[in-house]
Amino acid sequence: MTIKPSIKKSKIIIRRWREDDIAGLVQCQKSVYQSDFPTDSAHDRRLFELEFKKFPEGQVLAESNGMVVGYACAIIVQLDDSQPYYTYSEITGDSTFSTHDPSGDTLYGADIAVHPDYRGSGIAGMLYSQRMRIMKRYNLRRMVAHGRLPNYHKYVGQFTPEQYVAEVKERRILDPALIAHYKAGYVVKAILFDQLVDRSSMNYTTWLEKINPEFSDTKRRIASTPIKRPVRRIRVCTAQCELKNISSWDEFKRNVVYFVNTAASYHCHFLLFPELFTLQLLGLLDSQASIQNNLKELATLIQRYKDLFQELAQSRGLYIIAGTHPVLRNGKVFNTAFLFTPTGRAYEQDKLHISRSERSTYAFNPGEAIRVFDTPMARIAILVSYDIEFPEVSRLLVKYGAEVLFVPFATDERKAYSRIRFCAHARAVENCVYVVIAGNVGNLAQADSLMINYAQSAIITPSDFAFPTNSVEAEADANTETVAIAELDISNLLLQRDIGTVRPLFDLRVDLFETQSKVPIEVIRCD
């Protein structure tokens, strides 16, 4: 790298942050990471302010001619060494530094960055020196950090991440971030995958540690509680609904309330209904009209449908994936799934893939948006029926954090059902993700394509020693109106992605192929 003469001569000042530095910090971060991270992953002003307020002594920057040209963030934490490696979000409280613990024994380096125009001028070394001073000043046992591998994308086909790190250590390959960590005295303890979405590093991250040789244990005999990885368990219920010829809205409501009350009585967090189970309401419409006209008429009931499920989700404290219901937009009909939250909010996910029969029979149109719903219990996504048969979508959703895939479906006979079931198992194995499927049973004379139904709803797991032998946590009896309920351990799922017998997400040959979305993946934070 060639450094401009004007930059060479400029004086670099290393100091702590001040409140009026926040705008400059935001701008510096954008300059550093704009090509490597999704725009939604960058800090906003609020997060920098939270970090500064929580531990101002740990936040330093480099300044040149009044401009922020580098910065380093750190907090003190107490980690449990018996636990597997922590994620960035776990240690930093999702970048808020709410986990800062003055009685801890570890300095965590949350971020360090140098403006591209000032790299090679020794700023990184000066910032690391400040971190060392903080570690010694507070008599901390060690420093730890997650590190990037920004040049790994150039060598991904030649070396595994472990081999690449070894090559950089011997200086046979140049990686500016890793070499800077080595110069600072860090040791690479592990290589992790999918800690961050980082294109240049191919989503690989190093876990780094530097021991404080001056640490005095006798000076730090203060009882402290380590950050424990939260045990995240959710209980899910999949409703296997029998389609019936009903004569009133109240009759439909009674059927819905039955399943909601069942899920609530078993203390479930999530309840899944089948695809198009609201077609029972066709019995309230003109039996002589075409199915396509009736679907448009059914779409006019959308507000009653939403009001019903919003009230039930709120009153029962449930996250309800309320199957799908026809939605009319600009004269086009979409097969849309809805997520209703305990706070009364409603979120939509259109069916993305429309089969030949759905186009001809229902005139459904395909959706465009791909969404992950970040709930306090788990990150979930909804794939409507046929969507589960396309592995690319599931892989994209998991890349953006999905932990459970909910699949409402409607299939008429055993072979159609088997396509859904087998693909659900495949997606669970490929992505180390839970998959919950819910289908209809019974018959519905008003809808030609739903005259018969076959379903065996199930809650499906990956296939490894930590999960059931048949990779099924629970399943309903076939072709019977009932529910299946199971408890899913989200913490264990994420752990198995790192330590499982096979690690499909870790072992991807991204040098040969890559799954990319042509539209932004929306991560929606739900209350």
Image (tube, rainbow, N blue to C red):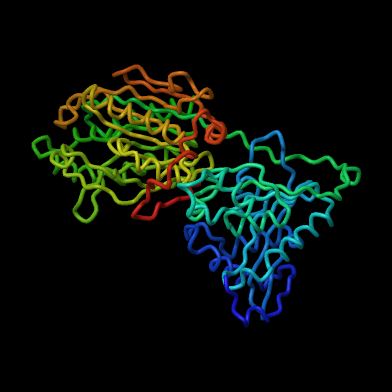
Left or right: 115, with 445 as reference point: right
Residue 402 on image: x %, y %: 46, 41
Question: Is 130 on the left or on the right of 293, as rendered?
Answer: right
Depth check: give the residue in front, 371 or 178: 178
Up the image or down, 296 lies above or below 116; here it is above
- Percent position (x, y) of residue 291? 14, 38
> Is residue 233 in view from this perspective?
no
Q: Residue at x 63, y 42 (%)?
A: 190
In the rendered image, which quarter contains the N terminus?
Answer: bottom right
Residue 480, percent across and down?
31, 18
**Residue 491's image quarter?**
top right
Report the front residue among 125 and 471: 125
| 485 to the left or right of 107 | left
Q: Quadrant of residue 68?
A: bottom right
In front: 405, or 267?
405
Q: Residue at x 68, y 54 (%)?
A: 182
Which residue does the image show at 55% across and 65% down from the upper left? 32
- Looking at the image, residue 368 sits to the left or right of residue 379; the answer is left
